[in-house]
Image (cartoon, rainbow, N blue to C red):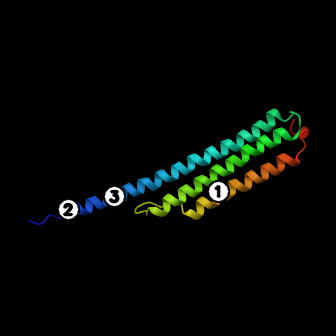
């Protein structure tokens, strides 16, 4: 009597495929977590400048804020590199993943926003913020 169900080999292959899909989704969640960390770091820099903008010399709070903003940019690019490396080693079977291009686009948007924030930080007079 023939068995119409999937073979043990097919079931094992399905479980492996699903495990890879779960790993890809976990990779995207990890990238999102690092992106949130990058935004928080940029926010810390901006908040530092707002709270301590009256420090002397004038360039000190801007420099410290710029370091935090640069750190946020570094974090998003490290996250992008790691996420793309993991994504390139795995293949999606039943899910649609973010493409490497999308991850890179997100990293560039963060970078351009942080760059604009840094430029504004250095060009805007501290009295205008208060």
Q: Is disc 1 placed on a helix, strand or loop?
A: helix
Where is residue 106 shown, x and y percent of the image? Answer: 63, 57
Q: Which mark is residue 107?
A: 1
Residue at 60% across / 53% down in the picture? Answer: 78
Return the residue nearer the eye: 97 or 62: 62
Asked which quadrant contains residue 111, the reply is bottom right
The quarter of the image holding the N terminus is bottom left
First of labels 1, 3 by sequence position: 3
* Residue 97 shows in the view: no
Q: Is residue 21 left or right of residue 28?
A: left
Q: Is disc 3 placed on a helix, strand or loop?
A: helix
The quarter of the image holding the C terminus is top right
Where is residue 85 shown, x and y percent of the image? Answer: 52, 60
**Measured Cα–Cα span from mark 3 to mark 2:** 18 Å
Return the residue nearer the eye: 47 or 70: 70
Q: Which residue is mark 2?
A: 5
Residue at 63% across / 55% down in the picture? Answer: 77
Q: Which mark is residue 16?
A: 3
């Amino acid at each position: 009597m023939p068995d119409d169900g999937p073979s043990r080999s097919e079931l094992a292959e399905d479980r492996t495929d699903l495990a890879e899909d779960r790993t890809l989704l976990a990779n995207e969640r990890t990238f999102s977590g690092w992106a949130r960390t990058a935004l928080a770091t940029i926010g810390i820099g901006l908040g530092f400048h707002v709270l301590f903008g009256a420090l002397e010399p004038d360039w000190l709070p801007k420099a410290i804020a710029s370091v935090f903003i640069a750190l946020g940019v570094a974090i998003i690019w490290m996250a992008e590199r790691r996420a793309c490396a993991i994504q390139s080693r795995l293949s999606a079977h039943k899910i649609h993943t973010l493409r490497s291009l999308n991850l890179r686009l997100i990293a560039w948007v963060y970078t351009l926003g942080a760059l604009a924030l840094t430029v504004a930080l250095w060009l805007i007079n501290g009295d205008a913020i208060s």
